[in-house]
Image (cartoon, rainbow, N blue to C red):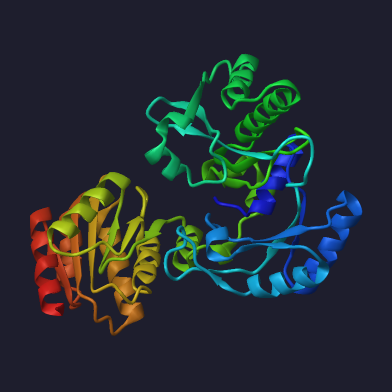
């Protein structure tokens, strides 16, 4: 589950990670009041107005602006709040900005020049261990750094039994070229950051940039946090941070029915049970000349109600020109799935999208009989190749 920058920073701060202070606002007037508060509490004459959406690259799209006085605060907030912000991570449609973070200026002059770094904590699935990935090239797209200067990216592998050791935190600070007070500050920062990552059951913490200020403080200027959905039952307070307005409405509806759903850009909807079968079905769709419109796994205990809910969600996509239902009945009974298809078809009525149903396993024969005798315009298949051929046929007829 992705959360906003201001929410991520609040979590980090609760674990002792120093962050760029800020106040969230949903109107230009609230932004002005926030700037006044930052001036009062942190003597921050200038502030940064930062769009709060679940995507990176906000500055490139005009979603991060510096304001030098209260008039500029209001002007910048008016420009950003309500805009459709397009970044490299949003796609061409962009995302609407509903709120901004008014943040203190931390790039003040001092004894040394401010310096930006990159630090993230995530799971290396191949090794089954957490890693801390870091670089001296903060403030840049890490993908670009990896492509052009891979020697500037370092990784620290964490033993799951021992956790982050003090010498590893010190090594990270050393590899970043720090010494003296700044090195001590970075060591504490990394230690607190890793503790936050572990104890919140997160999938990723990405801080870009981590800033060394002109007086050698180390703090998080940004925070991209992804919480592991599977751990949210242990963190009810974090589950409440979910912002459904940032998610695809179809995916939100699917999650309420406990369906694993991801919307894609293709023309063939697919409904399966099991992630592996879903991937195979998507491959079959592409081989047949189509493009998957979604990934939808109804799970191993699918019943008529689950299938009906899945059917409704797929049909909300206007790009869907055909639907392939591919169910292997192990735990789930094929006849129950077939009944769900029939119920959904009859309930929705006037469905003009051709439907191919391939059911194999428990009660597959009974399921095929139900479909064949339903009188509905549903194509039944036994073999996967048959289903693929039917997809090719209906797509050709739709073309």
Position of residue 271 in the picture relative to residue 84 (left or right): left
- Give the tally of numbered discs: 0
Position of residue 148 in the picture relative to residue 178 (left or right): left
Which residue is painted at 78% across and 67% down in the image? Answer: 31
Position of residue 364 in the picture relative to residue 304 (left or right): left
Frontmost residue, 297 versus 381: 297
Residue furthest toward the right? 40
Position of residue 271 in the picture relative to residue 35 (left or right): left
Residue 40 figure quarter: bottom right
Q: Visible in this render: residue 254?
A: yes
Which residue is painted at 75% across and 38% down in the image? Answer: 214
Q: Visible in this render: residue 383?
A: no
The location of residue 252, given as percent across then percent down, is 50, 63
> Quick check: 70 above or below 42?
below
Frontmost residue, 276 versus 378: 276
Which residue is painted at 45% across and 59% down in the image? Answer: 88
Frontmost residue, 389 versus 41: 41
Which residue is painted at 86% across and 49% down in the image? Answer: 42
Frontmost residue, 245 versus 17: 17
The location of residue 188, given as percent across then percent down, is 71, 26
Residue 59 figure quarter: bottom right
């Amino acid at each position: 589950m992705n959360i906003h920058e201001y929410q991520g920073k609040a979590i980090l701060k609760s674990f002792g990670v120093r962050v760029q202070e800020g106040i969230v606002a949903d109107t230009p007037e609230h932004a002005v009041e926030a700037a006044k508060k930052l001036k009062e509490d942190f003597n921050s004459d200038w502030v940064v107005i930062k769009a709060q959406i679940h995507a990176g690259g906000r500055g490139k799209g005009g979603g991060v602006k510096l304001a030098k006085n209260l008039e500029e605060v209001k002007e910048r907030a008016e420009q950003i709040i309500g805009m459709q912000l397009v970044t490299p991570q949003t796609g061409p449609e962009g995302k609407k900005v509903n709120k901004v973070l008014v943040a203190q200026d931390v790039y003040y002059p001092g004894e040394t020049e401010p310096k930006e770094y990159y630090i993230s904590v995530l799971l290396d699935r191949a090794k089954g261990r957490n890693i801390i990935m870091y670089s001296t090239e903060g403030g840049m797209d890490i993908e670009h750094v990896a492509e052009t200067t891979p020697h500037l990216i370092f990784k620290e592998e964490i033993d799951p039994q021992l956790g982050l050791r003090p010498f590893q935190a010190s090594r990270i600070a050393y590899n970043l070229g720090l010494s003296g007070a700044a090195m001590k500050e970075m060591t504490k920062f990394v230690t607190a950051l890793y503790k936050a990552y572990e104890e919140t059951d997160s999938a990723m913490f990405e801080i870009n940039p981590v800033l060394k200020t002109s007086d050698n403080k180390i703090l998080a200027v940004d925070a991209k946090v992804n919480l592991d959905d599977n751990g949210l039952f242990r963190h009810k307070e974090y589950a409440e941070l979910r912002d459904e307005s940032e998610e695809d409405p179809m995916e939100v509806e699917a999650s309420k029915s406990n369906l694993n759903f991801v919307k894609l850009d293709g023309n063939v909807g697919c409904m399966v049970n099991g992630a592996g079968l879903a991937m195979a079905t998507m491959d079959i769709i592409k081989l047949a000349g189509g493009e998957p419109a979604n990934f939808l796994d109804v799970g191993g205990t699918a019943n008529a109600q689950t299938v009906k809910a899945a059917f409704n969600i797929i049909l909300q996509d206007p790009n869907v020109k055909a639907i392939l239902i591919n169910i292997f009945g192990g735990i789930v009974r094929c006849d129950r799935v077939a009944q769900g298809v029939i119920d959904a078809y009859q309930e929705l009525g006037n469905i003009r999208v051709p439907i191919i149903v391939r059911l194999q396993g428990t009660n597959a024969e009974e399921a095929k009989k139900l479909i064949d005798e339903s009188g509905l315009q549903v194509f039944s298949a036994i073999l996967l190749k048959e289903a693929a051929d039917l997809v090719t046929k209906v797509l050709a007829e739709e073309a």
